[in-house]
Amino acid sequence: MPEALKDERLPKHLKRPLEEWWEWYDMRYAMPVEVDIEPGAVKITIFYDAEEELRRCEEACVKEAEKELKAEDKAEDIEWEEAEKEVWRGCHETCVEDIVLSVYININRAIDMLDRMLTRYGIKGKMERGWENYKYWARCEVELD
């Protein structure tokens, strides 16, 4: 974003609302922001790749579940290999729910604030959101005259 704010192709009427939004955003979030300045539009995209965070969460969850299962069944010989698939499935679902909720809240808060900043200056942006694998993104596209 800092580079885009210095880019001569950025229309002057967008500079002030984007500066204000960036000042607000930069103090709160570390999610990457991409700005594409094209002949007919400016696109601001915030994204978060949750794949690594999901992997770490699943691994920690599975380790904890294995430890708990083995502690509960000390007298019995439990077959961890049999239980592992079910544990992974449960851990995956739990981790996805937690991470997705956090990502939605943060990205949506950021893109909604961008929309409010633009609206304050009389600028209308088209908002889009989506998932690609474990990468969530939100984009604001401002069409240029």
Image (tube, rainbow, N blue to C red):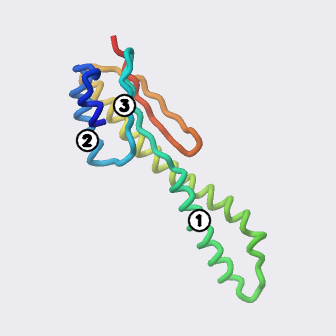
Q: Is residue 99 above or below residue 122?
A: below
Q: Earlier in the sequence, mark 3 or mark 2?
A: 2
The type of residue carrying mark 3 is Val
Kind of element beneath mark 2? helix
Q: Is residue 118 left or right of residue 107?
A: left
> Which type of secondary structure does the marked residue at label 1 adopt?
helix
Classed neighbour count for the residue bearing mark 2: other residues with Cα under 10 Å, few (<14), some (14–19), many (≥20):
some
Position of the N terminus, as image quadrant, is: top left
Task: Tell me the mark number nearer the camera, choosing from 1 and 2.
Answer: 1
- Mark nearest the camera among 3 and 2 is 3
On the rendered structure, is 68 left or right of 36?
Answer: right
Q: Which mark is on residue 35?
A: 3
Q: Is the residue 35 above or below the residue 84 in the image?
A: above
Q: Nearer the viewer, mark 1 or mark 3?
A: 3
Q: Which mark is residue 123?
A: none
Q: Amino acid at mark 1?
A: Glu
Label 3: few (<14), some (14–19) or many (≥20) C-alpha neighbours in 10 Å: some
Residue at coordinates 34% horizontally, 20% vertically from top-left? 124
> Is residue 62 shown above or below 123?
below
Q: Label 1 neighbourhood size at 10 Å, few (<14), some (14-19), many (20+)?
A: some
